[in-house]
Every structure is written in C-alpha cells, then in structure tokens.
Image (cartoon, rainbow, N blue to C red):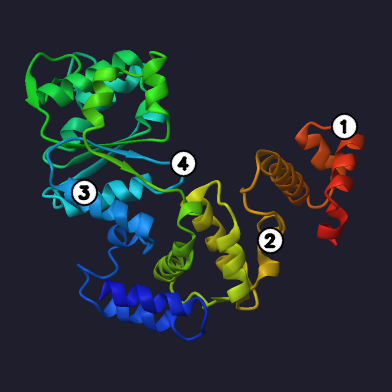
Amino acid sequence: MRRRLLLSAREAIFKPGYVNALVNEGHNMNHAIAFNFDHLNCVGESAAFQAVLKRARKMAKVPRPILIRGERGAGKDLLARFIHQAGDRSGRAFVVMHCAVVPDEFFATDFFGREKETHVDAQPGKLELANKGTLFLNEIANLSRATQEKLLRVIEHKKFEKVGGAEAFDADVHFIIATNAPLEEMMDSGEFLPELYHRLSFAELILPPLRRRREDIPALIAHFVQQLHFEIPNLEQKTFTPAAIKDLQAYHWPGNIRQLKNLIEQLYLTDEDGVIQSSDLPLALTTVEPLNGTFSEKVLAFEKTLLLNAIKDAHGNQRLAAQRLGLPYEQFREYYRKYHLHELMA
C-alpha cells in the first residue's frame, strides 16, 4: 500500500487532481500503518541507494554497532531510523544524541545519567532512555579523545555507571553512529581513537550524496509534497513542470536531501498560481553548471554561484552583495562583467 501511494504521488507532482485523493486515502487507512514517514523517508530507487538499504537491512539484526558515513544533509538520521525499524528492537525506544552540540564537560551526565545527590536531582541519561532500544550518536567525530575512551568502554563491556554513583548498569542498547568526518585521517593525526574506529568499522554504511542519485529526486519531491499535505489540511495542490524537475535534477545539491526538502517546501508553500516552473527556482539552480569537469572549471562554477547567491540575497543590490562577500565594489564589478551576470539578471 505504501509503495502504491508513493508511486501515485510521483504522478501528482506532474498532474493535477492526485494529491488530495492520496491524502484522503491515506487518512482512511488503518492509523497504525497510515503513512509511516519513518519508513517512507528512505525514498529512492537508484541502484546506489538500494544497495545501501539492502546492506542496512542485513546489518539491522546484527548485535554490533553500525557506522553510517555520508555528507551533511544526506539523510544519515533517516537511515538510522530505518535500521532501527528493520531490526529486532523496532518496538523499543529510538534515542538521539547530537554529539556536536553537547559540550565535553556535560557529556557524562547526558550520556550516563546522574544519581540523586544532596543538592542535585537524579537525571536519566541517554543510555537509560534507550534501554533495550537504539541509541543514535550523531557526529561522533566531535567527541574528545577522553570521551571516546568512555564510549569505547561501554561498547566493549556493555556496562556503565551514572555520574555520582557506583552501581553498574547494563548497557542494553544497539549503537548506531554517524559522521561526515574523515575518521581515518583523524586517527592518523591522533584526534580519533584507533580502538574505537576498529570497533565501529565492523559494520559500515556509506550513504551516497544526492548528486550521485539524481534519479531519486522526483520520488523525493513527491514524498515531500505528500508530507506537506498531511501536515497542512486543505493545502492547495501544486504541480511541477517537467522543465523544473529537470533543473532540480541537474543541480549539484551541496546540502543534499535537507537542502532539497527545504527548497521544495518553500516553493510549494509560496507558489501562487499552482504551477511551479523553472522561473520559480532560485537563480543559482538554473544558471550554474553542475560541479563537474576540470578543477579550474569547478572553481569558476563556484565563483559564479557565490556571486549569484550574494546578489539574490541582497535583492539585486550589488554594493550590498559586494560588502557581504568582503570584496571591494570595483573588484565585484570585474567579476560581474567576467561572468556576464547582467545577462542572467535580466
């Protein structure tokens, strides 16, 4: 049922009259299975993405930590949820810890929890909250060496003690770890613990960036549109022209799926005539070549994108764009003439 609805939704981004019917049908389904977005978020039929999902399903039932690697915005958190739901702990808690935003001095309390003391209340840690479930540690490369050693001990011994306590508790959790950092280089430079790296690399998944799975973009757009219609009752249906879809597929998406999702939501919610065309897309998506070719060509494409985005953000005010880029105005004008930006802005 989910697959049929998703395939039908792909038609909806090209043809009017589909989305509202899909939404009604989805609401009439059994509530327990109606559009479980945790499953549907892993959308894509490209060979590269399907290979990752196939391997993820196998790893989900293996009682070992899983390491997910990929660029920012590529969907590592969504893949982690997919693994959780495909495994034996799917009915248990899925707990997330963002290592990049937890200061090192607070990690122990947040991770292990704290026992009640004279002037301090007890606080459950992520290990306790994820008991018999899954603990997803995002951006693990941000942890200090000392904190990495603490994590390694928990993974190896499956035991932990809370801050301020002496009792040993079982760490009955399935660890899923994610990073976009070059762990091998960090290990060579002494920033990442080799023992932890080898523990984590037992089961490794590499999530391809969106530019390596462009054929999945129409399905992803359809999925984001479905989500919007479920979130916002009576939302007017919009369609995307084939030319707009082609431009979206041609872009290199440095922010990956997160960037695509944000743009689709912005376009869909602000469009006024019901049809989203190439002219509605941000200028950089329709005028700059994808990042391929020689190194010098990539540099030129990047400069051009930077200039166009600055002009767009400054609402056409070139002096303000130059100021925000930190360029003297005359130098900005040289770039402006070099890339014939006056033709693109016309």
32 vs 237, left or right, is: left
Disc 1, SS? loop
Disc 4, SS? loop
Number of residues whose C-alpha sits closer than 10 Å to that of mark 4, classed few (under 14), some (14–19) or many (20 or more) = some
Number of residues whose C-alpha sits closer than 10 Å to that of mark 2, classed few (under 14), some (14–19) or many (20 or more) = some
Q: Name the residue under label 3.
A: 84
Q: Furthest-front residue in view?
A: 294
Q: In whole angstroms, how far apart are the C-alphas of marks 1 and 4?
A: 32 Å
Mark 3 is on which residue type?
Answer: His
Q: Mark 1 points at which residue?
A: 328
Disc 3, SS? helix
Do residues under tags 4 and 2 come within 8 Å of each other at their CB atoms?
no
Q: Quadrant of the C terminus?
A: bottom right
Query: At 33% from the left edge and 20% from the top edge, which residue is drawn?
Result: 106
Do residues under tags 2 and 1 come within 8 Å of each other at their CB atoms?
no
Q: Which mark identifies residue 286? A: 2
Q: Can residue 4 be seen in this view?
A: yes
As drawn, 252 above or below 298 = below
Mark 1 is on which residue type?
Answer: Pro
The first of marks 2 and 1 along the sequence is 2
x then y, percent, for residue 240: 57, 74
Q: In whole angstroms, how far apart are the C-alphas of marks 2 and 3?
A: 38 Å
Q: Name the residue under label 4.
A: 72
Mark 4 is on which residue type?
Answer: Arg
Q: Is residue 102 visible?
A: no
Q: In whole angstroms, how far apart are the C-alphas of marks 2 and 1?
A: 27 Å
**2 vs 1, front mark:** 2
Number of residues whose C-alpha sits closer than 10 Å to that of mark 1, classed few (under 14), some (14–19) or many (20 or more) = few
The first of marks 1 and 3 along the sequence is 3
Disc 2, SS? helix
Do residues under tags 1 and 3 come within 8 Å of each other at their CB atoms?
no
Q: Quadrant of the N terminus?
A: bottom left
